[in-house]
Image (cartoon, rainbow, N blue to C red):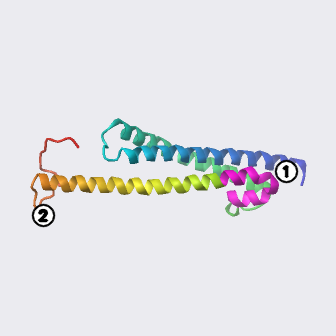
Amino acid sequence: MSSSVQTHEARYAGRLLAAVRDETAAHLRLIDLLRSQEANVTRPGNDAFRAATDGLQAELARVPHRAKKRAQILKDLAGVFGVSVKALTIGSAVERLGDRGVALGAARTELQAAAIETRRLTLRVGALVRMHREVTRDLLQVVLGGDEQHDVAGGGTLIDAEI
């Protein structure tokens, strides 16, 4: 392998490593925000819940940029390896890099763990929010004496309450 190819390979591998570490850091921020939402799910009007929700929206808005950046790096690296970009993943790049891909392999493992935790917490917080909404609706139904045909959450009933 020529030194020029090795230089390009090393440069793109370094950029991919930085991108993977950036994605891992983003997942860790999401995890912190999801944990804050989880802790405050019964108080959706408080500042901590709102701040976590706003933070989640801001983090999620950055996802397309990171995905585009990673796709471009993989495309560049696929060119250096002489393979189709569809055939190149972070894992296959680690394999192709051999000993030079150890740090990338470790970063990939960290990213996988963070992504799994993000998914777990996302599902959990979603379930808690749905459960809280249902309990609140059921409580309003009982307190306001609505019957089965009239759902108080459907509107038309004025209440003076803070939830």
Numbered disc 2: secondary structure: loop
Amino acid type, callout 2? Glu
Compare marks 2 and 1 and give the one earlier in the sequence: 1
Q: Does the magenta stretch include residue 26?
A: no
Indicate the position of residue 2 as horizontal and vertical percent values: 90, 51
Numbered disc 1: secondary structure: helix
Quadrant in which the N terminus appears = bottom right
Indicate the position of residue 136 as horizontal and vertical percent values: 23, 52
Q: How far apart are marks 2 and 1 (CA)?
A: 72 Å
Query: Of discs 2 and 1, which sits in the foreground?
Result: 2
| Dominant secondary structure (helix, strand or loop) of the stretch shown in magenta | helix
Locate residue 60 relative to residue 66 in the image: left or right: left
Say which quarter of the image contains residue 126: bottom left
Labelled disc at residue 22: none
Instruction: Say which residue appears at 65% left-offset and 48% top-offset.
Output: 20
Instruction: Say which residue appears at 50% left-offset and 43% top-offset.
Output: 59
The boundaries of the magenta stretch are 88-108
Indicate the position of residue 120 as horizontal and vertical percent values: 48, 57
Instruction: Say which residue appears at 20% left-offset and 57% top-offset.
Output: 138
Callout 2 touching callout 1 (CB < 8 Å)? no
**Which residue position holds label 2?**
148
Quadrant in which the C terminus appears = top left
**Which residue position holds label 1?**
5
Residue farthest toward the right in the current orientation of the protein: 2
Locate residue 154 relative to residue 6 in the image: left or right: left
Q: Is residue 102 magenta?
A: yes
Judge by depth and name the residue closer to the eye, 85 or 150.
150
